[in-house]
Image (spheres, helix red, strand yellow):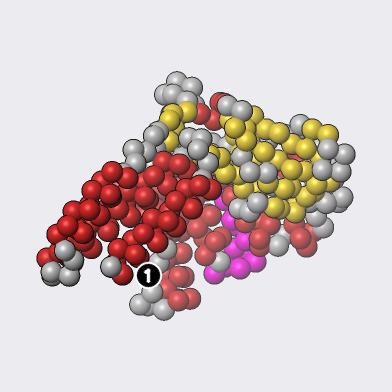
């Protein structure tokens, strides 16, 4: 009986969760510099991540998985003789009857990417006027043209504003939404200071890293390496700097140099974390990719 009650509580929780989930099949999440709110200067690079997924299909899939897990419990209880056959049959029938069929939808196609349907709504929160800002689609990471939004579909596109273009964005607070087929994302907030960065701020490791990452997303390998080298000039043991440099070298197809940089990052990781630690999967996977390119 306690097991049945616990399952009913679980189903009740899932029902509550689903009630809050959107019934629409396209959900959009927007982040600015990896957060929903960012404060930047007028000469600071900005990165905007757009993720599309199907919250309803994901919730339906979790519902079904919960039912499957409960069926395993019921099978074991029946095997151990801890539940009556009629109780088992009753709950099994209830679980099977309540199964959901996750519904999917598609955005874009092989010839017209889902990103082509994106538009931007940018509101100056001071006067509530809508304005244009120079947001551009960046090339990396690449994304499939057609987004199949089912229980497992999750697609990301990266947009950005270069340090130079940020100078055309006036100071203020902006509420930004990404819109696809009249469906808005969450509103992310960009606060632009009434000044540019001073030299110390501009040459700080966090700003150098973000700027270098912007150029990596923009597929500018030369600029990526330039900013990585500026980080490493300040901090030769920076794992972020080494990883970024390897990324930039890989963009330039300098495979041997990139291999050496990534290996240096792995060695540095062991120095900082101990010989028994596990290096980041990203570094190891990039080394494997280069080995394949070099035929090793």
Q: Quadrant of residue 216?
A: top right
Q: Is residue 65 left or right of residue 166?
A: left
**Camera-nearest residue between 84 and 265:** 84
- Residue 85, can we see it? yes
Whether 168 is drawn above or below 263: the answer is above
| Disc 1 residue crowd, few under 14, some 14–19, many 20+, Cα 10 Å | few
Secondary structure at numbered mark 1 = loop
Whether 134 is drawn above or below 246: the answer is above
The location of residue 259, given as percent across then percent down, is: 40, 55
Residue 228 counted in the magenta span: yes
Residue 296 counted in the magenta span: no
**Camera-nearest residue between 146 and 152:** 152
> Magenta part of the protein: which range?
223-237
**Camera-nearest residue between 178 and 228:** 178
Q: Quadrant of the N terminus?
A: bottom left
The location of residue 36, given as percent across then percent down, is: 65, 51
Q: Could you tell me which residue is drawn at 40 percent across and 33 percent down? A: 104
Q: Could you tell me which residue is drawn at 33 percent across and 55 percent down? A: 66
Q: Could you tell me which residue is drawn at 58 percent across and 37 percent down? A: 138
Q: Could you tell me which residue is drawn at 36 percent across and 59 percent down? A: 8
Q: Is residue 35 left or right of residue 86?
A: right
- Residue 141, can we see it? no
The location of residue 163, given as percent across then percent down, is: 73, 44
Q: Which residue is mark 1?
A: 278
Q: Quadrant of residue 282?
A: bottom left
The residue positioned farthest toward the top in the image shown: 111
Q: Is residue 147 left or right of residue 232?
A: left
**Camera-nearest residue between 230 and 247:** 247
The location of residue 82, given as percent across then percent down, is: 17, 70
């Amino acid at each position: 009986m306690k097991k049945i009650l616990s399952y009913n509580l679980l189903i009740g929780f899932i029902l509550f969760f689903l009630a809050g989930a959107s019934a629409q099949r396209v959900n959009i999440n927007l982040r600015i510099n990896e957060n929903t709110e960012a404060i930047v200067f007028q000469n600071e690079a900005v990165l905007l991540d757009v993720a599309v997924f199907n919250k309803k299909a994901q919730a339906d899939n979790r519902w079904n998985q919960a039912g499957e897990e409960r069926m395993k419990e019921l099978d074991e209880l029946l095997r151990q003789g801890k539940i009556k056959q009629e109780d088992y049959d009753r709950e099994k029938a209830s679980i099977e009857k309540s199964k959901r069929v996750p519904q999917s939808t598609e955005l874009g196609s092989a010839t017209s990417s889902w990103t082509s349907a994106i538009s931007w709504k940018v509101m100056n929160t001071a006067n509530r006027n809508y304005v244009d800002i120079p947001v551009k689609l960046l090339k990396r990471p690449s994304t499939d043209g057609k987004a199949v939004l089912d229980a497992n579909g999750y697609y990301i596109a990266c947009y950005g504003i270069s340090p130079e273009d940020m100078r055309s964005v006036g100071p203020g607070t902006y509420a930004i939404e990404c819109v696809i087929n009249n469906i808005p994302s969450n509103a992310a907030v960009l606060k632009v200071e009434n000044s540019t960065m001073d030299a110390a701020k501009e040459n700080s490791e966090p700003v150098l890293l973000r700027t270098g990452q912007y150029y990596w997303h923009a597929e500018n390998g030369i600029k990526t390496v330039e900013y990585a080298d500026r980080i490493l000039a300040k901090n030769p043991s920076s794992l972020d700097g080494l990883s970024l440099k390897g990324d930039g070298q890989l963009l330039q197809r300098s495979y041997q140099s990139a291999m050496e940089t990534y290996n240096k990052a792995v060695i540095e990781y062991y120095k900082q974390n101990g010989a028994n630690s596990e290096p980041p999967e990203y570094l190891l996977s990039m080394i494997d990719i280069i080995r394949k390119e070099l035929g090793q």
